[in-house]
Amino acid sequence: MLERHLLDVAHHDGSPVHVPEGAPTLGDAVGVRVRVPRASGVRDVWLRTVRDGEPRLVRARRDGGDSREDWYAADVVVHNPVTAYRFFLDVPGGYRWLDGRGIHDREVPDAGSFRLTTHTPAPAWLGEGLVYQVFPDRFARSAAADARPVPDWAVTAAWDDEPLGAGQQHVGTQLFGGDLPGIVEHLGHLEALGVRTLYLTPVFPGRSNHRYDASTFDHVDPLLGGDEAYADLARAVRARGMRLMGDITTNHTGDGHDWFVRAVADPSSPERGMYLWAESGGTDVALQDDGLAYASWLGHGSLPKLDWGSPETWRRMVGGDEAVIARWLCDPFGLDGWRVDVANMTGRWGSEDRTHAVARALRERITRERPGAALVAEHFHDASADLVGDGWHANMNYTGFTRPAWSWLAAEDSGVPYLGLPVTVPRRPAAAMVATMREFASAVPWQVTVRQWSMLGSHDTARLRSIVGSREMVEVAAALLFTYPGTPVVFAGDEVGATGLDGEHARTTMAWDQAARGGPRWDAATLSAYQRLSRLRSSSRALRDGGLRWAVVADDAVAYLRETPDERVLVVLARAPWSGARLPRHLLAAGARPELLHGTVGLEVSGDGLVVVGDGPGVGVYRLA
């Protein structure tokens, strides 16, 4: 039996089909529109806003339609910097609410309401194409790396060695020797993949392979080639029409950082006030050999926590002429923005919470220094309270994309740990994935949703191929990544089928020697699928900026529409064979045939509808109008 479609309900989202483009200003009356199919039984529509904490209802006006659906419009008065609204639907025998999570036949909290924000959105370039994440030690090793002395903290490894996994001795000090000139040598791979932004994890020196324990923010690690190599990389990236983003730790430094060394050595130094000193025995507290106790990241003594109650911290990190956050945005490096490590913990300690103030200050400084620069947060759990639009432009969307996607795509027996939880990745029906995605997307303004960093893996997670188990399912996952609202981010190696069971074990090197001759660590078919999907997204405004309507949610398959005023694209994703579905015939432009853009899942046109064939696992992406 064919699955029933979900399109006979009222729909609204923040895309240009329903809301005018651009950020409004205070006092604007923004006309918003809602689509109401006749089959929904809705008799009338009202707009509910919240102004200065008080709900207001205004009746919506008819704004066009046809024999199948009506459109309603109403004006949202932007009286507050973030203005929430939802729709009241009058139906026989009662009423319904329409908010970002869907239709409800009960009272619901405002947390899921749609939002207009006066804050400037993320720069448009952030969503134009693929973001590619590189962990410098593992991407490529130039010939120059052989001549560099190995530091005393490092345990060297051969390029083809398997990385150590979480909890193993030397996991943080296993050094493969990748460097910045090695990245320059392989920028052609990025260009062929459709990369528009290269994002590197930290390049500052430390005493680890990950370099989140910076010993200074003033220079690039000589192991990577130093400042000159970073400047060369920046020039080479720009020459190919790409952008470069850095990675900064605003929550902590390394215990070998020159600031912390002076803070410990001299209680009267200005650096002493830059760190959080604590009572011994407390949570997330570490001890110096002399018994000096200090706050640290999750209790790791190598990562002392900065005190954002200190004017000196503000001056050196953000406000001063030589502030860390600003100097790397200038020539010869010219970074296009920052990804901020553990942004969720920055400025938070006990009763103190300066996170939003820090985020706003960071954004103000980077956009003043480099107009159009981007600021992206790392936040592994619910980031909605930190994403009102005036601080971080976007977040690494683990909770709203990665986790739910994994839970639907995972193989039955993957055995992969589930992002910090004491269970392996569960295999759930599509309804659970969709509900989670809708709930988290509804909690932030649409302009944030469409620039969130959507990832199927990162340097802190298992590899996609290890989770889903097969090349076919990797392509299903990649199709979701490239067609769902947000900015697609790929961790180097996923596009060639890299494997790994946890964050550290998944930090594999790139098998460049197998790119030409083939080999078990370079899946050319997977790379080809990523390249095609990347080109597809770049060619379709609907896939980059369009709204999202869920059309089918079956256990083993989903279908959704991405729509702009001038384009409609249907995406079908199946993890296994299923029953198929019949969609309304009117989705297809009059006299047109569906245009297959990617995949093999069939779509048949009949007199009374569009029949999606129940193939799987597989993908079908079609342009309908």
Image (cartoon, grey):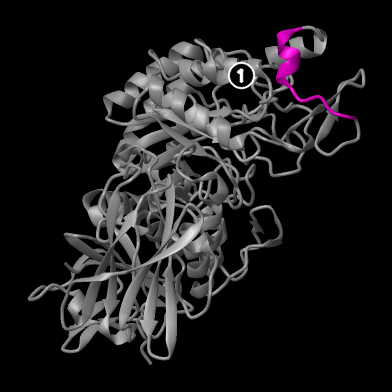
Quarter of the image where one finds residue 207: top right
**Percent position of residue 371, x then y:** 34, 25
**Percent position of residue 364, x then y:** 45, 27
| Front residue of this view, candidates 307 and 193 | 307
| Magenta run includes residue 277 | yes
**Percent position of residue 171, x then y:** 71, 36
Residue that lies at the very extreme toward the left in this rendered image: 591
Q: Is residue 507 left or right of residue 81?
A: right
Quadrant (top left/top right/bottom left/bottom right) for the C terminus: bottom left
Camera sees residue 140: no
Quadrant (top left/top right/bottom left/bottom right) for the N terminus: bottom left
**Percent position of residue 180, x then y:** 46, 22
Q: Which residues are magenta?
A: 269-279
Circle 1 sits in a helix, a strand or a loop, which is it?
loop
| Magenta run includes residue 530 | no
42 lies above or below 140: below
Residue tagged 1: 205
Q: Is residue 511 left or right of residue 12?
A: right
